[in-house]
Image (tube, rainbow, N blue to C red):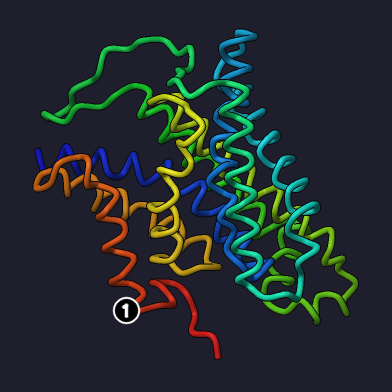
Amino acid sequence: MFLQYIVNGIFYGATLALPAMGLTLIFAVLRFPTFALAAHLAVGAYAGYVLNVWFGAPLVPSYVIAFLVAGLVGVIGDEVAVKPLDGRGSLSVAIVTIALSIIIENIMRFSFGNELRGFDVPLYRDSVVGGIRFGVQQLINFGAALAIMVVVFAFLTFTTLGKAMRAVADNPSLAALRGINPHFIRRFAVFLGMGLAGLGGALIAAETSVDPLMGTRTMLPIFAAAILGGLGSIPGAVLGAIIIGVISETSLMFIPPTYRSGVSFFVLIIVLSFRPQGILGEIKK
């Protein structure tokens, strides 16, 4: 049973890694964490659901549309509600992003209702290897998450736009002097970060279900993963998500599932108390 929980935790962590990467990517460029990420996770899930169930599209195009719609909604929300507050302090931005998340969630509640909805995915018999049970949809989501992580890492490392994003994250003033447009980089960072959140939401929904508040329920483990790995560090977000996933799943051996989210909160407190910069984060001087 312990090995089963470890495997489940790795699968769960890989799914959490995508929105955690989006959160830390936005923080690295904009220098503030956005609580609106929760609503965009649900936006992506519903966008994928509509294409998959209403129009009969397979999962891959549904995942793509989840990424694009969540990214576009994120850019619009940033331009309308968040960007006008530049220079007014992180507290104002935090309040606005929370309000933005609530507004988007209620729009989805009025549009789709509160009932649980599911993707139209084939039913597969679970595979058992060495006494460990693997769900086929779990394996599909795990493979998709790994592939997306590799693409994001390669994009940030090898492409000109990815290098420009890293330059703005390291030193915005110097990047501007080198001819990099910080406003475009901001928009693209928000698009990519919110798109990853929406894609993560679609992966979660394909394995479980989709409802307007799914992002709010998942936000605490996502924040815990990003902070544990080190806000601003993409590899740290992945590492933190896997650790949070494993800890959350193995905790079910000792506590009821109702209290699983409390484990992420406990980990968050420990990290902030003893290593606030996270595992791979740097101490800001």
Task: Identify whether 104 is placed above or below 230.
Answer: above
The N terminus sits in image quarter: top left
Answer with the quarter of the image where residue 5 lies: top left
**Around disc 1, counting alpha carbons within 10 Å, would you say few (fewer than 14), some (14 to 19), or many (20 or more)?**
few
Question: Which residue is the site of mark 1?
Answer: 273
The mark tally for this picture is 1
Image x and y of residue 193, in percent:
63, 51
Which residue is pictured at 60% across the width and 25% down the height? Answer: 110
Q: Secondary structure at mark 1?
A: helix
Image x and y of residue 77, in percent:
73, 48
Comparing 30 with 81, the one in front is 81
Which residue is pictured at 44% across the width and 72% down the height? Answer: 280
Name the outermost residue toward the bottom.
Answer: 285
Task: Identify whether 177 is placed above or below 235.
Answer: below
Which residue is pictured at 55% across the width and 91% down the height? Answer: 285
Image x and y of residue 48, in percent:
59, 24
Which residue is pictured at 49% across the width and 80% down the height? Answer: 282
Image x and y of residue 250, in percent:
17, 47
Position of residue 138 in the picture relative to residue 262 (left or right): right
Amino acid identity at mark 1: Ser
Comparing 129 with 90, the one in front is 90
Task: Identify whether 37 is placed above or below 175.
Answer: above
Position of residue 115 in the picture relative to residue 8 (left or right): right
Answer with the quarter of the image where residue 10 lies: top left
